[in-house]
Amino acid sequence: MTALRDAELHLRKAEEFLTAAEFNLDMKLFNATTSDAVVSGINSKDAICLKLTGRTEKSDDHHAATTELRKAGKAGAVLAVTLQRLLKLKTKSQYQTVSVARQDARDAVEWARKLYEGAKVVVQS
């Protein structure tokens, strides 16, 4: 597969998980909302990096993901702070006993949407 094709597939996954996050937000499932938003954001990052650099790293290191996005070019650098904010909610939504608050879930969806929209522009250009 080519990097462009992989970018398109990551973009589709980003959209799917964003849709799931929006649905879960409507259902007041705030941990699931946030977790889905995080996965959407990571797939958006992968799509951007693949399109702009031809590669993407797979790592559990959140700092590395934001650094990779920042280094991918101007479009990635603009979205790196948004990804960083989103990734800060990953551990709470997926592993901690304390649940994500409604406003944090709403923010997560907004950030995931911003990343998806940015990735869509990059991949389709």
Image (spheres, grey):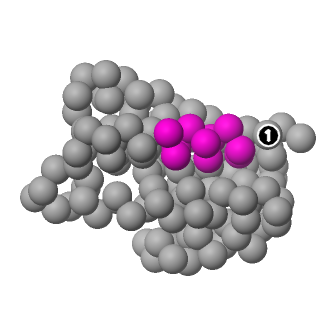
Q: Of all residues shown, which one is farthest toward the left?
A: 97
> Which of the 4 image quadrants contains residue 8?
top right
Q: Position of residue 62 (x, y in %)?
A: 47, 72
Seen in the image, is 40 located left or right of residue 10? left
Quadrant location of the C terminus? top right
Q: Please say whether residue 37 is one of the residues in the magenta stretch.
A: no
> Please, what is the three-letter code of the amino acid marked with disc 1?
Val
Q: As rendered, which of 114 and 68 lies closer to the eye?
A: 114
Q: Which residue is mark 1?
A: 121
Q: Residue at x 67, y 66 (%)?
A: 69
Residue at the location (77% across, 67% down)? Answer: 72
Residue nearer the viewer, 98 or 32: 98
Q: Is residue 1 above or below residue 88?
A: above
Left or right position of 82 against 93: right
Magenta region includes residue 115: yes
Label 1 element class: helix
* Residue drawn at 26 percent across, 53 percent down: 93
In the displayed structure, does residue 104 sit left or right of residue 49? left
Tell me which corner region of the image, top left, top right, bottom left or bottom right, holds residue 30. Answer: top left
Report the residue that reaches farthest toward the front: 103
Magenta residues: mostly which secondary structure?
helix
